[in-house]
Amino acid sequence: MSKIKMLLDVVNEVKKEAPEDVPNWNAELAEAKINLQNQIAKGRLLPRGVEDHPLEHFAFNYSVQRDVRAGHVMNIMKKFDPRVCCPVSAVKRSDGETLYIFDGQHRAVALALLGWKKIPVTIVETDEPAFDAEAFEIVNDSGILRAGTEEIHRCLLHRYKMGETETERVVTAHKVQEIFDHCEIDLEPKRVRKSPGKCGPNKHYFSHFDYAYKGIKMAGEAGLLQALQALRTVYGDEEGGEINQGLFIGLMKQYQMGAEAKRLGRLPEKWMWDMLDAMKKICPSATLIHSATKKQWQHANGVGWDAPVAMGHMLREVYLLEDGTFEPSYMQNVTLKLEDGDIAPDSEAQTAFNKYVK
């Protein structure tokens, strides 16, 4: 059975199957097409390839290629900017005109779905029977380095600086950075922190970019600001000045639960400080608390680690056990069993929660 498929046949398969596989496919495809027209109206066009060829000339060899993934095609279309669409790469045999794409399958399908009739392509002419397989392996197994969240954050900040102040992602990045700067906490990876010539100027730093963005989504600007200030005050003496990501996301979860239950207005102004002070009394090490909570969560629940939920409820249970004066937020049927004294044996939980061992 032949594993060669023409590009237009694959496009038709995607059109038929994608609406079942990708939620809101038709609406998002229509939105992507409108966005494309807006970009073209601004003069944003595809770069010139070595050659432009009609869709009918292209094919995929599925003895080599991975199966097309409609979700990935949609991701390309939703973020599509013609100016940064690289040409696909294809091989052409001497016995025909068909161009077998070995790099850019999803890009080609996206271009076809968006209405392009021709695609820019760089062509390798060879009759080596296994060239497309070799090329596919080289392209996809050569240590392609995806941009990390910190690099994306830096790019978003630059876009804001250059005047792009209406894109939500760009504005969010600016707000996150503003809050960290206000708190005098460097937002930077650990590897940068270890480089004296590259690290930020502040005593404290936070390295979990994903949590920084998740935090502002969960708790807004006010919650993010309060959590960073409270952590710097109560647990600011950690080695190296690191703001602990586990306690941070626990506070964000507490804030989120409180907001959803409309309870924040009934809490003391410094409730985050109060919860951390209670935690500090039983365990002065934020790093130990983080790892111990993971062990205790798994011991108490026998399931995988849900860091925001586990850390948020750990803060609640410790605060109440230390005679706290307000009721922190919680989810039904979630517990770490600290009150029962059932502490995870042979683990750091025995040290961090030693006071509660029965």
Image (cartoon, helix red, strand yellow):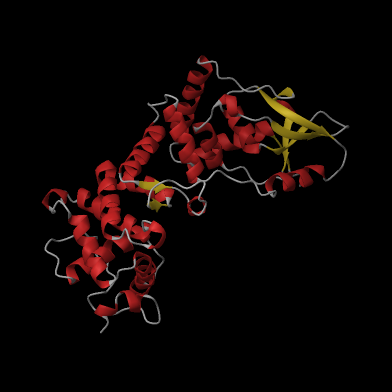
Q: Residue at x 42, y 29 (%)?
A: 160
Residue at the (52%, 36%) spot, across then down: 74
Where is residue 221 shown, x and y percent of the image? 28, 41
Assign the C terminus to one quadrant of the image. bottom left
195 sits to left or right of 86: left
Q: Residue furthest bottom?
A: 358
Is residue 238 placed above or below 105 in the rendered structure? below
Q: Which residue appears at 48% of the width and 41% of the height?
A: 22
Which one is in front, 262 or 177? 177
| Residue occupying the point 34% across, 64% down | 286
In this view, 213 is above or below 174: below
Residue closer to the observer: 16 or 332: 332
Determine which quarter of the picture holds residue 325: bottom left
Hey, which quadrant is residue 60 in on the image?
A: top right
**Residue 117, x across and y down, in percent:** 65, 22
Residue 235, percent from left and from top: 30, 60
Q: Is residue 38 left or right of residue 92?
A: left
Is residue 86 in sight in this rendering?
yes
Q: How many marks?
A: 0
From where the camera sits, is residue 55 visible? no
Which residue is nearer to you in this view: 262 or 18? 262
Q: 104 or 354, which is in the foreground?
A: 354
Give above or below for 309 relative to 67: below
